[in-house]
Image: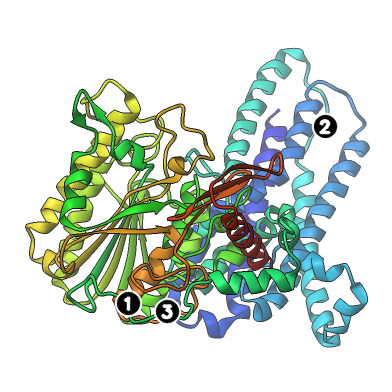
């Protein structure tokens, strides 16, 4: 029994070691890129990379676990066990070695770790081989052979430990329980831990230096996890032929010719910028009252004190897609999320990258886990120099299911903004709240309705944070953008595809705001990037979908949003909602808007396919 269990532990540990050794080899291979990392950087690559190394090891150990469990009860000839396991380990060794050898060669040209994209080129082997230098092929083949041989040698030595003889039912019963417990730990390794986020490439991202994050990434995981991503994005919504689509989008795209200069709403050109993304802050909740008492009194107060966007909409119903819309000016998708495709999301423009190029220090904070939906990889890749989340924070209070609550985080974030302002360097600081998210468990008791109570709690926390900033010297040169990540189905009768379901608040406040005002133009999250950068005098020509709200028309001002099976478009002339499930128009008060929505949806998927 001890030999069986020792065999399992040895397989797992040997696989982790085999995966970990790829890191120093990769960094040595690209010594020029790794030159600035120092010893500490190499160690961090190894340490952070262990998460996905253990995930791969968990998958590899799954079959040996089943074999050990079966061997407790069933008598199978030893030579059969060894033959099956040897073949299995040989397959693992060869596949791992080939992926690693190809990845090391491709990184120089691609700039990211191997994924399923390589299969596109293998569909035409003759053409693919034509681009491979002979000696490069020899070198990578030798690397793969040496690595596979080393792995297989280690597995064969471990296989000597395995004992395939049954142990009798008196020992098999408790032995089976032990194996099941080990299987539970193996499942945790595969899942990536106990946190809310499952294993993904973002788990190993730890640095604003892309090369170090790439070095920490396990290429086997990167390749296998992307096998389902080989979609024909451009063919998802073929409303128009390519020439027609391009022409229609040119008339809608951001950065089109304006009738004149943008209106100034700030009284300073380069303020410090704070973007607070408010979890699920729906406009319907913000306007709600319980027995005459407003659910969000602070948002109601702040909208009167700053620039209030009356007709503003979210681009999606999910946080990951809302963040990309806000921070990169890129429209949300229907059945997918570009944030979950690191090889594509890294190519998006972003407010952080644009401001970092102007000398701004950029940082983003969240009380939960930024590995969720690959947020960390997206943010590091698009210019956020420092990410701070639950693992970096220590409070004298327990975390909720999603992380530290808004009271703790808003208080901490106010301190941070004040400290950043004292450095006299321009900065962009972001915060994502979380308490107004299901299960709506908050240390607050104002309303009986759990949803409204949680929303009121977050509103209270944000209001106190703004008041603290207002009372500090930081306020004078500060622009605070308060915007929801998406709406919320309140009241319960609100359908998922109704425009009102996607209407959200946006407020610009701070000492940098020239005066309070109400903006009536229709707009959505994708328009924040161009609008903000234009006010700061920063070029925004790479934000193709983002329109400057304060620029005179053209281009046409409208709000666009996507839900799981369709889109909606709203502007001053009316609305149009199209449901892909039945291919039908749900509502239509302006037929022309249907073409606008179809153009935006198709262009978004065409764009993703090209990135």
Relative image position of residue 65 (x, y in whole percent): 73, 35
Relative image position of residue 266 (x, y in whole percent): 21, 72
- The residue wearing badge 3 is 258
First of labels 2, 3 by sequence position: 2
Badge 1: residue crowd in 10 Å (few <14, some 14–19, many ≥20) = some
**Cα distance, mark 2 to mark 1?**
77 Å
**Cα distance, mark 1 to mark 3?**
8 Å
Relative image position of residue 505 (x, y in whole percent): 32, 49
Q: How many marks?
A: 3
Q: Residue furthest top?
A: 170
**Cα distance, mark 2 to mark 3?**
77 Å
Is residue 347 something one can see in this rendering?
Answer: no
Quadrant assignment, res 309: bottom left
Q: Nearer the viewer, mark 2 or mark 3?
A: 3
- Numbered label attached to residue 470: none
Up the image or down, 175 lies above or below 223; here it is: above
First of labels 2, 1 by sequence position: 2
Up the image or down, 393 lies above or below 64; here it is: below
Q: Look at 69% across and 44% down and name the residue there.
A: 59
Q: Confirm or deny contact between disc 1 and disc 3 (CB under 8 A).
A: yes
- SS for callout 1: loop
Is residue 527 something one can see in this rendering?
Answer: yes
Badge 2: residue crowd in 10 Å (few <14, some 14–19, many ≥20) = many
- SS for callout 3: loop
Q: Nearer the viewer, mark 2 or mark 1?
A: 1
- The residue wearing badge 2 is 164
**Front residue (pair 1, 427):** 427
Q: Quadrant of the C terminus?
A: bottom right
- The residue wearing badge 1 is 262
**Lateral position of residue 344 relative to residue 469, left or right:** right
């Amino acid at each position: 029994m001890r030999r069986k269990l020792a065999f399992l532990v040895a397989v797992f540990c040997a696989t982790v070691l085999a995966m970990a050794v790829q890191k120093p080899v990769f960094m040595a291979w690209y010594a020029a890129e790794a030159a600035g990392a120092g010893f500490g950087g190499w160690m961090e690559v190894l340490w952070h990379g262990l998460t996905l190394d253990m995930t791969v090891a968990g998958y590899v150990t799954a079959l040996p676990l089943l074999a050990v469990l079966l061997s407790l009860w069933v008598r199978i000839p030893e030579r059969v066990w060894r033959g099956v396991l040897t073949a299995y380990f040989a397959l693992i060794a060869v596949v791992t070695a080939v992926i690693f050898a190809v990845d090391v060669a491709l990184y120089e040209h691609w700039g990211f770790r191997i994924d399923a994209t390589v299969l596109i080129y293998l569909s035409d082997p003759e053409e693919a081989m034509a681009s491979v230098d002979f000696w490069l092929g020899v070198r990578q083949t030798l690397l793969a052979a040496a690595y596979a041989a080393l792995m297989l040698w280690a597995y064969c030595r471990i296989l000597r430990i395995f004992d395939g003889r049954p142990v009798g039912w008196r020992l098999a019963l408790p032995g089976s329980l032990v194996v099941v417990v080990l299987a539970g730990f193996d499942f945790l390794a595969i899942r990536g831990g106990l946190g809310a986020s499952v294993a993904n490439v973002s788990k190993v991202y730890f640095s604003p230096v892309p090369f170090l994050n790439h070095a920490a990434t396990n290429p086997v995981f990167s390749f296998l996890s992307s096998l389902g991503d080989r979609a024909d994005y451009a063919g998802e919504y073929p409303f128009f032929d390519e020439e027609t689509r391009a022409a229609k989008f040119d008339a809608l795209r951001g950065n089109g010719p304006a009738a004149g200069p943008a209106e100034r709403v700030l009284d300073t050109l380069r303020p410090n910028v704070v973007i607070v993304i408010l979890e699920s802050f729906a406009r319907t909740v913000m306007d709600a009252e319980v027995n005459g008492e407003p659910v969000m009194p602070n948002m109601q107060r702040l909208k009167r004190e700053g620039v209030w966007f009356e007709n503003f909409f979210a681009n999606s119903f999910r946080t990951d897609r809302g963040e990309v819309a806000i921070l990169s000016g890129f429209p949300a998708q229907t059945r997918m999320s570009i944030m979950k495709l690191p090889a594509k999301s890294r190519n998006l423009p972003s407010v952080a990258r644009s401001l970092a190029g102007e000398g701004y220090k950029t940082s983003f904070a969240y009380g939960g886990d930024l590995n969720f939906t690959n947020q960390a990889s997206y943010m590091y890749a698009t210019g956020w120099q420092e990410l701070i989340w639950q693992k970096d924070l220590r409070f004298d209070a327990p975390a909720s299911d999603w992380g530290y609550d808004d009271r703790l985080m808003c208080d901490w974030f106010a301190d941070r903004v004040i400290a950043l302002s004292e450095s006299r360097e321009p900065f962009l600081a972001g915060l994502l709240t979380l308490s107004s998210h299901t299960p709506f468990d908050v240390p607050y008791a104002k309303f009986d309705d759990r949803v409204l109570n949680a929303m009121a709690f977050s509103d209270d926390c944000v209001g106190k944070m703004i008041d603290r900033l207002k009372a500090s010297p930081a306020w004078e040169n500060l622009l605070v953008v308060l915007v929801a990540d998406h709406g919320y189905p309140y009241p319960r009768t609100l359908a998922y595809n109704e425009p009102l379901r996607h209407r959200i608040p946006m407020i610009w406040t701070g000492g940098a705001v020239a005066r309070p005002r109400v903006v009536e133009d229709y707009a959505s999250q994708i328009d924040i990037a161009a609008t903000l950068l234009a006010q700061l005098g920063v070029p925004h020509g790479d934000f193709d979908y983002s329109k400057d709200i304060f620029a005179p028309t053209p281009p046409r001002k409208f709000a666009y949003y996507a839900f799981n099976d369709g889109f909606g478009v709203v502007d001053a002339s009316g609305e149009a909602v199209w449901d892909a499930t039945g291919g039908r128009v749900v509502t239509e008060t302006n037929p022309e808007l249907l073409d606008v929505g179809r153009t935006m949806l198709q262009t978004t998927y065409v764009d993703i396919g090209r990135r």
